[in-house]
Amino acid sequence: MIGLTLKHLRYFEALATHEHFGRAAEACAITQPALSLQIKELESMLGGALVERSSRKVHLTTLGEDFVARARKILFDVDELGDLVRASKDQFAGRLRLGVIPTVGPYLLADTIKALTGRFPGLEIQPRESVTKSLIEDLHKSNLDAAIVALPISEAALQEFSLFEEDFVLVRPIEDAERPVPTANKLKEMRLLLLEEGHCFRDQALTFCEMEKSSPRYLMEGSSLSTLVQMVSAGMGLTLIPEMALPLETRSAQVAVARFPRPSPSRRVGMIWRKTNPLAEHLMQVGAIVRKVSQSRRDEIDATLKASDRTEAGRPLWN
């Protein structure tokens, strides 16, 4: 088809994904009028309408649905070709689209980017923070090269690379510091603050408490670990957070932190990517660097926690 370009395909794929001209234009880093012009140009070449336009939402026509399915396959193959060329080079360079879940990103991402760009000076890190389900979808669509998530994912098409394991700790109001650490069964009866639905950390905490469907009377939700800790500081309940989050989330909150007795709740965090990705060997190197960064970070936290464990009873583990 004369005049059809990859730019047309990428712009239309973004519009089909976001179902809104403004959001699609933002994702493509162009103006909304420019995106609209490109879509009209594409429709003119095809001789038919791809979308039904309205003020709130864009709906794909039958032609649009068929076209975007083919376009996504073409874009996927083009990205794979680019990765194949990059994989043939000794020095890993160019774009690395790295996803990360919100309960890891704020505590690991900055040090990871610094370490990766130090090891691979020509590497351009493009991070994206989102929940696990969204990151996996983007991996399958080739919108991401790799993602840092809680394992296991157990999908045949994805390679899993273990990074570290860490315990969950209890965060409660500072006046409760001297009280015994509640058991999992006891937590069911308390006002437990958890992340909103969609976060895997929420599911892990509910599994530990053996709570499949919590009563609204006892369960409160927050959009981030920061929100949960601040809610605890305000006396609204208690929560669980991963050890990695302790320094950042508790430094300005009046809370007490305590370990659970063994076996304590924990999670395994790792990096995943498509098994067919030509960059697989380079991603193994990336994973090894992230593992080293996370271990260094956790060693610092463990040293502080162990020192705090030796303090007088009732004192918070982290100040």
Image: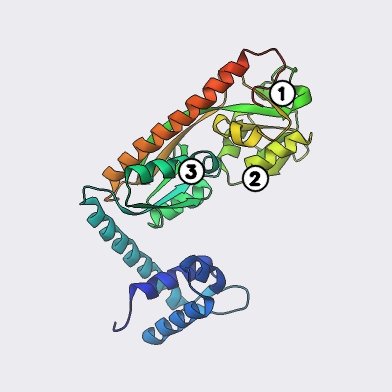
Image quadrant for the C terminus?
A: top right
* Residue labelled with disc 1: 186
Q: Which mark is residue 203?
A: none
In primary-sequence order, the first of circles 1 and 2 is 1
**Residue 180 percent location from the top left of the image:** 72, 16
Q: Residue drawn 43% across and 77% down?
A: 63
Image quadrant for the N terminus?
A: bottom left
Q: Residue drawn 58% across and 17% down?
A: 307
In primary-sequence order, the first of circles 3 and 2 is 3
Q: Residue drawn 56% across and 80% down?
A: 53
Quarter holding residue 83? bottom left
The answer to whether residue 5 of the structure is visible from this angle is yes
In primary-sequence order, the first of circles 3 and 1 is 3
Q: Nearer the viewer, mark 1 or mark 2?
A: 2
Q: Is residue 310 above or below residue 161?
A: above
* Residue labelled with disc 2: 196
> Label 1 to label 2, Cα distance in Å?
21 Å
> Label 3 to label 2, Cα distance in Å?
25 Å
Label pair 1/2, CB-CB below 8 angstroms: no
Describe residue 14's horizontal placement relative to residue 256 as left or right.
Answer: left
Describe residue 137's horizontal placement relative to residue 189 as left or right.
Answer: left
Quarter holding residue 246? top right
Question: Please, what is the three-letter code of the amino acid marked with disc 3?
Answer: Ala
Q: Is residue 207 above or below residue 280?
A: above
Front residue of 232/200: it is: 232
**Residue 211 percent location from the top left of the image:** 65, 33
**Residue 204 percent location from the top left of the image:** 57, 34
Label 1: how many Cα within 10 Å (few below 14, some 14–19, many 20+): few
* Residue labelled with disc 3: 110
- Label 3 secondary element: helix
Question: Please, what is the three-letter code of the amino acid marked with disc 1?
Answer: Lys
